[in-house]
Amino acid sequence: MNGFTERIEKIVSPAASWLNNNKVIQAISKGLMMSMPIIMVGAIASIFQNFPLAAYQSFLSDSYFGQLLTTIVNVTTNMLAVYVVAAISYTYCKILGNSDGFICSLLALMNFFLLTPMIVIGEGFAATTNLPIEWLGAKGLFTAMLVAILTTRLFDLSVKKNWTIRLPESVPPFVSKAFAAIVPGFLMVILFGLIAFLFSLTPYNDVHHTIYSLIQEPLGNVGNNVWTAALIYFLSGLCWFFGIHGIAVIGVVMPIWIAADAANISALAAGEAAPNIITFSWINIVSSPGGGGATIGLIVLATFFSKSQRYRSMGKIAFVPSLFNINEPVIFGFPMVLNGLMAIPFIFTPVINILLGYALTVMEILPPSNGAGSMGMPIFLNALLNGGWRLLVFQIVATLLSIAIYYPFFRILDQKEYQLENPDPK
């Protein structure tokens, strides 16, 4: 068993460590998480906008509140890429050790808009130039991420190579930083303007259409597949087993799942059916109540049914954090790391939940995600907001299933620990 574990560790650990330490993936993951409040506000506005009550809908259509809710969705979910490009650029700049994150995010926004095709409506003095909201939301997310990373790398390179205007030390720092960004800003305008021109010569006409058609849409088809989701959570559990944070693996597909959430929110706000089952909010609610490994069942067993003092104390400590999907006390205190017996339920319980939840959603027993559940929201409440009473019932069932799966494995460890605490008198 030890030899097999060592062989698996040699395969998994280098790849997982690379993902965990990769600065680009860190920046994208943290930037997307910084954008979660925007997604939540848009999702909740969409819920209020589509509340299925005739009198309420009549009230919205006859009052300003209906227009207000539409505006909220438009400036949050339907402009998500704008917030993401700024958040990722700011985060990446900080990760690279550059203190000018705010200026870098402004340059990233400039470059993103430079690549976004403008629409001119009308002629002469009556003509207006408009930004198509289509590319400012979910469909523009991958372009936003690429622009943020490229802009930040170029800005960091410019600063390190001293391609900046340097002012005397007597000048206030905010003025010096603003002038220092002028040369990098001009260089980026030239570069991104050239990129926009070259892509205008392609059959796709612009960068957004190209990236969405060739990268984002194909990756979305792969990432929104139930077997991909099951594999990702299997690998995430395997990483936890070796003491590597499982978010390193989930971060790879997080952009795809968040884009799917944004697409669902936009569709529901427009009165259309949600197009995606596998989304970031759905996967968090369905797969792992209580945190990675769906350990809520284990914590319930330890808190209320443990014979040993050690595991009962551990359960009491971990119970409240687990309600907010925080289970590091269990993972490192139980521990789950390199625990061959507990690895079985820890790795496979989320996979079972995903497959079961997906099947029930396909059969239309469960509703698709509306994007309103976030990682920091308490379990049960996140399910209720995300999919109503049906998803709440599923999460309760998933909790009971977690208890049933963990029970035989926990019983073995608890019995051994109890015997150590209460040795037979000789």
Image (cartoon, rainbow, N blue to C red):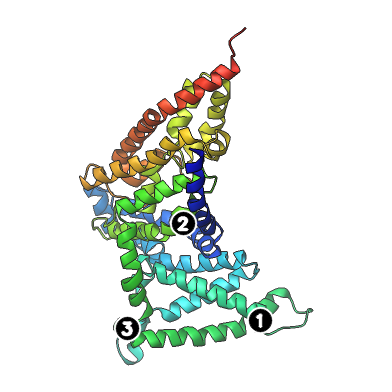
Side of 376 relative to 173 (left or right):
left
On the image, numbered disc 2 is attached to which residue? Answer: 251
Label for residue 205?
3
Instruction: Tell me if residue 48 can be seen.
Output: no
Where disc 1 sits, the SS reads: loop
Which is more foreground, mark 1 or mark 3? 1
Mark sitting earlier along the chain (1/3)? 1
Side of 362 relative to 183 (left or right):
left
> Residue, x 45% and y 48% (percent of image)?
236
On the image, numbered disc 1 is attached to which residue? Answer: 161
- Few, some or many residues within 10 Å of mark 2 (<14, 14–19, 20+): many
> Image quarter for residue 135?
bottom left
Q: The residue under label 2 is which amino acid type? A: Gly
Q: The residue under label 1 is which amino acid type? A: Lys
> Residue, x 27% and y 49% (percent of image)?
56
Q: In the displayed structure, would residue 201 be above or below residue 110? A: below
Give whichever of 14, 239 is nearer the camera: 14
Q: In the displayed structure, would residue 347 be above or below residue 67? A: above
Q: In the displayed structure, would residue 360 be above or below residue 226? A: above
Mark sitting earlier along the chain (2/1)? 1
Cα separation between marks 3 and 2: 31 Å
Q: Quadrant of the C terminus?
A: top right
Q: In the displayed structure, would residue 26 be above or below residue 231? A: below
Give whichever of 266, 87 is nearer the camera: 87
Picture coordinates of residue 79 (x, y %)? 40, 67
Where disc 2 sits, the SS reads: helix
Q: Residue furthest bottom?
A: 124
Q: The residue under label 3 is which amino acid type? A: Asn
> Residue, x 21% and y 45% (percent of image)?
364
Picture coordinates of residue 270 (x, y %)? 27, 61
